[in-house]
Amino acid sequence: MNYTIKEFAKKFHTTEHTVRYYTDIELLPCQRDSQNRRIFDDTSANWMQTITCLKKCGTPLKEIKKYCHLCHLEESEENLKARYQIISDQRKKARQKAQEAQATAAYMDQKAKHYEDILNGQIPDDTNPRAWN
C-alpha cells in the first residue's frame, strides 16, 4: 500500500514536518512520484515503526541513525551484534518505563479510590486539605 506524506504522518501520529525531516536525513526511505512528491510504502512503514519505537524508548536521534546505518550495511556477525546491542539496550529501557508507568498507575488507582470513598461517604471527609493530598 502507498501513502502520501499526510496519510503517513497521520498513520504514525506525527507531523508531516517530522516525516520530511526523517527522509531528508535518510532515516526513512521513500519513493517520489512524477511530481517529486514523497510516496511511502510498507517498507517505509516498517522503518517508521522502528524509528517510532526507538524514539518512545528515549533513544537519541544519533543512536537511531547509527542503528539505521547498521541495517543498511552487509550483514556480518559484528554488524548483527551491534544492532542487537542497540535493540537490547532500548528494550531494557522500555521495560523499565513500563514498570514505572505501572507503579504510577497503581498509585493513581489508590488515590482515585480514596476520593471515590470520600465522595460516596464511605470515609469521613477530612477538611484538612493536606490530608487529601
Image (cartoon, rainbow, N blue to C red):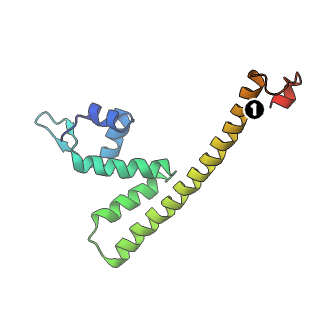
Horizontal and vertical percent position of residue 119: 74, 21
Horizontal and vertical percent position of residue 84: 41, 68
Compared to residue 9, the image places residue 93 above or below, namely below
Residue drawn at point x = 57 percent, y = 51 percent: 97
- Nearer the observer, 25 or 116: 116
Q: Decide if residue 25 is in sight here.
A: no
- Indicate the quadrant containing the C terminus: top left, top right, bottom left or bottom right: top right
Check disc 1 and give the amino acid type: His
Q: Decide if residue 122 is in sight here.
A: yes
- Nearer the observer, 104 or 118: 118
- Nearer the observer, 21 or 88: 88
Residue drawn at point x = 41 percent, y = 70 percent: 82
Compared to residue 60, the image places residue 39 above or below, namely above
Residue drawn at point x = 45 percent, y = 68 percent: 85
Where is mark 1, residue-wise? 114
Compared to residue 97, the image places residue 34 above or below, namely above
Within-10-Å neighbours for mark 1: few <14, some 14–19, many 20+: some
Horizontal and vertical percent position of residue 122: 79, 26
Residue drawn at point x = 81 percent, y = 29 percent: 132
- Return the residue found at the far left: 34
Compared to residue 88, the image places residue 52 above or below, namely above
- Nearer the observer, 128 or 80: 128
* Horizontal arrangement in the rendering, residue 109 relative to residue 63 (left or right): right
Horizontal and vertical percent position of residue 113: 71, 33
